Image: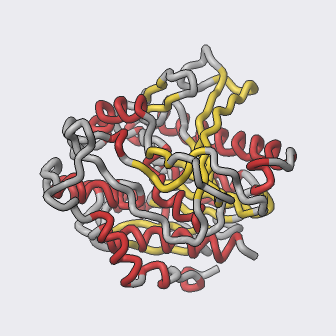
Amino acid sequence: MSSSAFTVDRRTVTKSAMAAIAALLLPARGGVARADTGRLALRLPPPTGPHRIGVTALHLTDRSRRDPWEPGIVRELMVTVFYPACDVRGYPVAPQMTVGAAQHFQEFAPLFHPELPRAGVDWAAALGHAHTGAPAQPVRRPVVLYSPGGGDPRTLGTGVAEELASHGYVVVTIDHPGDASEVEFPDGSIRESVFRGDPRTAPTVFRTAIRTRIADTGFVLDRLEALAAGRDGLGRALDLRRVGIYGHSAGGTTAAEAMHEDRRIKAAINLEGFLDYPDGKLFPIAERGADRPLLLLGTDGFSQKEELERSWSLMRHVHRRQIDDAAHGVFTDYASMVPQLQSAGLVTADNRKELIGAIAPEKSVPLVRGYVRSFFARHLRA
């Protein structure tokens, strides 16, 4: 497959789509939107597909593995499943983050991203567009996994996940406990990240993180297979003959290498993730090449772009695309949230440029969604 074989579905980047997102993200009349707390209430762009969305969170326990970050316990995961719903009436709209996770995120996120404000935002007030517990349509649909960036929670991928679900996919976003900034479990306990900085600066930590993430994705697929075998409820919506994966940063590394190692995965998208270890040793996917569809999607403003090219430039038979006037965080919900923070005076123009670039959300949001959706439509719909 040559890179010219794939192009974004430009219908997703129409003026009408950009206008709709721009309207949603404009400050509320009289100033920025405020929650009851008086702090800024952020808004997520709506999905553009024809399907209403249901959502549910699953607590999964892998008793065959010890947790690498806390060896005294078995490996536990939290995932969120977004899916086309039959009927959403009477089912509440899910928040982007739970209250407990949002409170921890407020404290922890600026350690990873110093550009973010330490106060002034009600992170728990941001609502998505999916309805908690709404019944799934009993139609087998392609399944796509999402692995977030190192230190990031799965909730920062809500926008793209909702977009895919609204167009007929089942999307499973995965938290990697001990890696993610915080993971809240059903009993209210919160597991925070062991990271204190960029894992790439600690080779052993980086290696452990990626190996753990790949094992997590395989375990999630195992559990989805068990769910599909039940042939009721959410299981009836899973077509595990058509599985894709996408991820951001460390999640992009995970997506590419997980596809290489797991034949159940038919297509993968790497959103600016390294394909080598900090010492320069290549991951097998980069060393041997991709034998299934792989998209490498980057930005012109990534601060580690030169280092990234060290592994990406060796890849052949892959699709490659770049988003201009953008930076590393543009692939997450920060693409729409950071401009709102800037409008509220909580981040500077320089902060914004460092996090997501100068690109406007009414352009970047449809563009990222378009690349992701078009790629999976091409490779998972056959």
Q: Residue furthest front?
A: 90
Residue drawn where x is 52% and y is 46% of the image: 92
Residue drawn where x is 81% and y is 49% of the image: 228
Residue drawn where x is 65% and y is 60% of the image: 84
x, y (%) of residue 272? 44, 59
x, y (%) of residue 171? 62, 55
Which quadrant does the N terminus fall into? bottom right
Which quadrant does the C terminus fall into? bottom right
- Against 223, residue 349 (above or below) is below
In the image, taking residue 93 as reference, residue 318 lies left or right, namely: right
Q: Foreground residue, 306 or 32?
A: 32
Q: Residue furthest top?
A: 72
Image quadrant assignment for residue 285: bottom right
* Residue 254 can be seen in this image: no
x, y (%) of residue 26? 24, 65
- Against 360, residue 61 (above or below) is above
Image quadrant assignment for residue 195: top left
In the image, taking residue 348 as reference, residue 24 lies left or right, namely: right
Q: Foreground residue, 294 or 43?
A: 43
Residue drawn where x is 58% and y is 62% of the image: 52
- State the colouring used for the structure image: secondary structure
Q: In the rendered picture of this protein, how many numbered marks are placed on residues?
A: 0
Q: Foreground residue, 293 or 118?
A: 118
x, y (%) of residue 103? 34, 31
- Against 81, residue 52 (above or below) is below
Image quadrant assignment for residue 208: top right
* Residue 269 can be seen in this image: yes
